[in-house]
């Protein structure tokens, strides 16, 4: 929680947070800032109160305020914060305990900046956030210093994604696979390399061009054949007419 107190043109800020780990009560921390700088930091844990003061005030000057802060943290803020945190976790329990399987793809794309290409393993749409993503070359894990990426990124639906990539040369003939383990999966998921999404499109274009070329060749041949056939028929008709005239 954060509180702001405005006094004329001066701003006092107070921030408080509490922790709970494995159903065990953690600490509560309170920080106070004045004019943009931290004034003090108070911590209450397991009945013990500690503090740090970032000011020029002497111990006798701040002792009454510290005793009051200790009382507020221990008797008021700490129980209220833990109760609020428990209620929040209870409401979010369904979401926090859900398991969503990752969608995994291993793709190779040509690199426009070099003659090689990039092999990328992408896992997306998974929850919870922890995942193991490993690239293999001929059955052996690729060294970490060769890999780029690997950052865990959030999706707008509350799931996560991760991508790991590897630059390879044009002459590379190794076999690449991607292996994924996640809480939502019963077994390890191994994914084989897919072709570049652009390659089927290129192949389709090439096939269409070949078909068009064949149609053009056969069409031209058919037209030439018909033209020659017409000329031959016209020549025979002319010859027959001339022969008939002489006979008469």
Image: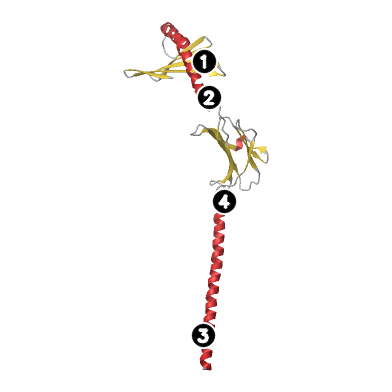
Please say if the residues under marks 4 and 3 sit with CB atoms less than 8 Å apart: no
Alpha carbon of mark 4 to alpha carbon of mark 2: how far? Answer: 45 Å
Quarter the N terminus occupies: top left
Reading the image, the residue beneath label 3 is: 238
Closer to the chain start, of discs 2 and 3, is 2
Alpha carbon of mark 1 to alpha carbon of mark 2: how far? Answer: 22 Å
Alpha carbon of mark 4 to alpha carbon of mark 1: how far? Answer: 58 Å
Closer to the chain start, of discs 4 and 2, is 2
Alpha carbon of mark 4 to alpha carbon of mark 3: how far? Answer: 57 Å
Closer to the chain start, of discs 3 and 1, is 1
Please say if the residues under marks 4 and 2 sit with CB atoms less than 8 Å apart: no
Graded by Cα atoms within 10 Å as few (under 14), some (14 to 19) or many (20 or more), the crowding at tag 2 reads few
Residue lying at 52% horizontally and 84% vertically, measured from the top left: 237
Residue 93 - label: 2
Residue 200 - label: 4
Q: Is residue 164 above or below residue 23?
A: below
Residue 162 screen position, x and y as percent: 55, 35
Residue lying at 54% horizontally and 83% vertically, measured from the top left: 236
* Residue 23, quarter of picture: top right
- Lateral position of residue 103 relative to residue 60, left or right: right
Please say if the residues under marks 4 and 1 sit with CB atoms less than 8 Å apart: no
Reading the image, the residue beneath label 1 is: 27
Closer to the chain start, of discs 4 and 3, is 4
* Residue 97, quarter of picture: top right
Alpha carbon of mark 2 to alpha carbon of mark 3: how far? Answer: 98 Å
Depth check: 69 or 213 in front?
Answer: 213
Say what secondary structure mark 2 lies in.
helix
Alpha carbon of mark 3 to alpha carbon of mark 1: how far? Answer: 113 Å
Q: Is residue 238 above or below residue 35?
A: below
Graded by Cα atoms within 10 Å as few (under 14), some (14 to 19) or many (20 or more), the crowding at tag 4 reads few
Say what secondary structure mark 3 lies in.
helix
Residue lying at 51% horizontally and 15% vertically, measured from the top left: 27
């Amino acid at each position: 929680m954060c509180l702001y107190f405005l006094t004329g043109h001066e701003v006092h800020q107070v921030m408080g947070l509490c922790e709970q780990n494995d159903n065990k009560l953690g600490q509560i921390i309170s920080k106070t800032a004045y004019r943009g700088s931290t004034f003090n930091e108070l911590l209450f844990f397991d009945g013990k109160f500690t503090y740090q003061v970032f000011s020029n005030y002497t111990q006798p000057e701040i002792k009454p305020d510290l005793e009051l802060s200790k009382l507020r943290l221990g008797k008021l803020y700490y129980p209220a914060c833990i109760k609020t945190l428990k209620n929040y976790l209870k409401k979010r329990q369904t979401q926090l305990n859900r398991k969503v399987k990752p969608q995994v793809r291993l793709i190779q794309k040509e690199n426009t900046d070099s003659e090689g290409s990039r092999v990328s393993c992408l896992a997306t749409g998974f929850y919870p956030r922890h995942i193991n993503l490993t690239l293999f070359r001929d059955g052996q894990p690729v060294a970490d210093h060769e890999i780029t990426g690997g950052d865990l990124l959030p999706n707008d639906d509350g799931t996560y994604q991760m991508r790991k990539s590897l630059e390879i040369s044009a002459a590379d003939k190794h076999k690449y696979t991607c292996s994924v383990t996640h809480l939502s999966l019963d077994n390890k998921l191994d994914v084989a390399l897919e072709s570049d999404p652009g390659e089927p499109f290129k192949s389709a274009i090439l096939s269409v061009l070949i078909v068009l070329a064949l149609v053009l060749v056969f069409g031209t041949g058919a037209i030439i054949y018909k033209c020659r056939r017409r000329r031959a028929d016209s020549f025979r008709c002319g010859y027959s007419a001339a022969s008939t005239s002489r006979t008469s």
